[in-house]
Image (cartoon, rainbow, N blue to C red):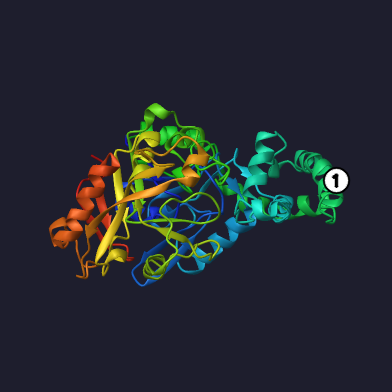
Amino acid sequence: MPAIVLIGAQWGDEGKGKATDLLGSRVDYVVKFNGGNNAGHTVVVGDKKYALHLLPSGILTPGVTPVISNGVVVDVEVLFNELEALGSRGVDVSRLLVSANAHVITAYHRTMDKVTERFLGKRQIGTTGRGIGPAYADKINRVGIRIQDLFDEGILRQKVEGALDLKNHILVKVYNRRAVAADEVVDDLLSYTERLRPMVADTSLVLDRALKDGKTVLFEGGQATMLDVDHGTYPFVTSSNATSGGAATGSGVAPNRIDRVIGVVKAYTTRVGAGPFPTELFDESGEFLRSQGFEFGTTTGRPRRTGWYDAPIARYTTRINGVTDFVLTKLDVLTGLPTIPVCVAYDVDGVRVDEVPVSQTDFHHAVPIYEEFEGWTEDITGARTFDDLPPAAQRYVLALEEMSGSRISAIGVGPSRDAIVVRHDLLE
């Protein structure tokens, strides 16, 4: 009864869809347990490219039941737009299940997100403006709207009106924006009710029964460890728990049911939005990584910040999540570089620090200490075994494995679905 958690090991955009695809037909359920449509997976199947934002990437695998669980905040309009787009391309979306306890992103959440971010000026966090943070804030403040509320118009109207009492005062008196009409919000949400009804379930119960029946369940985290609201570079983080512990609270499956934790890490590092990033590059090397890796946000289109691999972050991820296996992605992007620096520690005010500093101030001022590795020029996109890789690429992977605290079980060597080298079975 394997229950596997798949998480991002850096600041997101590591290519988690590649790892999900690797497990493929061996997985029965793929569960999204946190976040919303503020992140995305780009999955290449043959000559077709799919950009997913809210849906679990497992929806592209025939026979898999995709699940949006209680830890997710759901923009219902985005949900149906994605489903319709996939359906029009021949993808079977009929198996999708949505937790009755998942919270809903409304129009006023999106409005509050955008105006608040603009108001912060130079102190902006770098949100996507999609209402994620305000929806989670309402959840914690106990004024949120849940999926199940859409099936009781009286309750829905009461909750929307209650949530807008304060928000409209803020919008009008602080931000000089027009008030949001409760009727507009209610009518919009009710317009999705009948289409939504067949998908809604007690997903915690469904997953429990699946595990008892010996099914394989993959819990797919949105965003990544360094964006986790508790364990990331706060406040430059997302509003949910993107670490392996979030899989339990975000799905209603007990933590002792989890067998493996797979961390997905790029062969270099990227992040989107503001916040500290010790290995960030501002020269031609950064542009090389951005152009070769096509480092632009799946959801936002924003250029990603780029930098070299950061081994202390990988070790931190291993510790926080209990990583049993790493999937290293985009190794092919490094092809052509004469040397490849790797951050092995930091210099903080003249003192060598081997682990991620607990102080945000220290992390912000950390200067990377690099070790350089020989590069390679051979095309590796056709490699399918570790021995197919050039010796320099093999040495680079083995060095990262030793520094990162867990075995590297698979290596992405190209954008296509099958462009991957498998060293160890992810389920064993």
Residue 128 on image: x %, y %? 60, 56
Quadrant that contains the N terminus: top left
220 or 125, nearer to the observer: 125
Q: Residues within 10 Å of mark 1 (few under 14, many from 20)?
A: some
Label 1 amino acid? His
Q: Quadrant of residue 114?
A: bottom right
Q: Which residue is mark 1?
A: 169
105 or 337, nearer to the observer: 337
- Does dot 1 land on a helix, a strand or a loop? helix
Residue 45 on image: x %, y %? 36, 66
Residue 248 on image: x %, y %? 46, 33
Residue 172 visible from this viewpoint: yes
- Residue placed farthest to the front in the image? 350
338 or 258, nearer to the observer: 338
Residue 226 on image: x %, y %? 46, 44
Residue 173 shown left or right of residue 279 in the figure? right
- Residue placed farthest to the bottom in the image? 47
Q: Quadrant of residue 37?
A: bottom right
Q: Give above or below for 349 relative to 194.
A: above
Residue 110 shown left or right of residue 259 in the figure? right
Q: How many marks?
A: 1
Q: Residue at x 42, y 67 (%)?
A: 283
Residue 148 visible from this viewpoint: no
99 or 242, nearer to the observer: 242
Q: Residue at x 61, y 50 (%)?
A: 125
Quadrant that contains the C terminus: top left
Q: Residue at x 41, y 69 (%)?
A: 287
Q: Residue at x 34, y 53 (%)?
A: 309
Q: Quadrant of residue 217?
A: top left
Residue 60 shown left or right of residue 105 in the figure? left
Residue 35 shown left or right of residue 284 in the figure? right
